[in-house]
Image (cartoon, grey):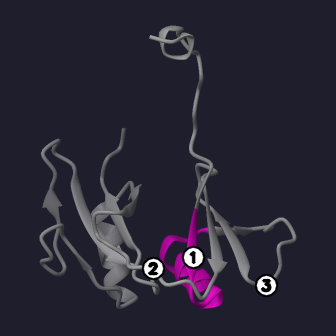
Amino acid sequence: MNERTSSPHNFTFHKDHDALLVRDVNKSAAFYSRIFGLEEIYSGGLGVKYRWFRFQDKVQIHLIESEEHFEPHKGVHLALNVNDLDAFMEHLKVHHVHFENWPGEAGTTNTRPDGIKQIYLQDPDGYWIEVNNNTL
């Protein structure tokens, strides 16, 4: 065992942001603003191909317009919890946003082994987003 792995650390980590490559930053910005009600914040002067948003807990999503190809997969997703999953599902229906459970059944939830209900939806670039009712 080396010194690095044998000594205790008192690090504290908090999530800062997720960065997503998107094809059309304005289309994606409209989605995250409209569907999740995110506050747009200053993007550090990076230019028009960058749009930054912040959740109520101050965690951010950085949208970066890019031509790079990527293949979204449901197993690699953002995970958010919401205080009222049923009301959020109604919000999605009003905005004509498709959502499904983990097995892929449209318009319904499933329950994880830990008892948390969840749904999945995709943003304009196909990124998967889990929304669950975990209130911890």
From the image, tell me which residue sits under label 2.
70
Residue 34 falls inside the magenta stretch: yes
Task: Kindly indicate whether the residue at mark 2 contacts the one at mark 1 (C-beta within 8 angstroms).
Answer: yes
Image quarter (top left, top right, bottom left or bottom right) of the C terminus: top left
* Residue 44 picture location, percent across and down: 84, 65
Choose mark 3 or mark 2, whichever is in front.
2
The residue tagged 1 is 21
Mark 1 residue type:
Leu
Q: In the picture provided, is 116 more to the left or to the right than 28?
A: left
Residue range in magenta is 19-38
At which x and y percent is residue 127?
41, 75
97 over 50 or under it: above or below:
below
Q: What residue is drawn where x is 16% and y is 51%?
A: 112
Task: Measure how far apart labels 3 and 2 are at the Cα level.
Answer: 21 Å
Residue 52 lies, in percent from the top left, at 69, 69
The residue beneath circle 3 is: 48
Upstream in sequence: badge 3 or badge 1 = 1
Q: Residue at x 37, y 76 (%)?
A: 72
The label on residue 102 is none
The Cα–Cα distance between marks 1 and 2, rounded to whole angstroms, is 8 Å
Q: Is residue 85 left or right of residue 62?
A: left
Q: Residues within 10 Å of mark 3 (few under 14, many from 20)?
A: few
Badge 2 local density, few (<14 within 10 Å), some, or many (20+)? few
Q: Assign a secondary structure to mark 1.
A: strand
Residue 69 highlighted magenta (yes or no): no
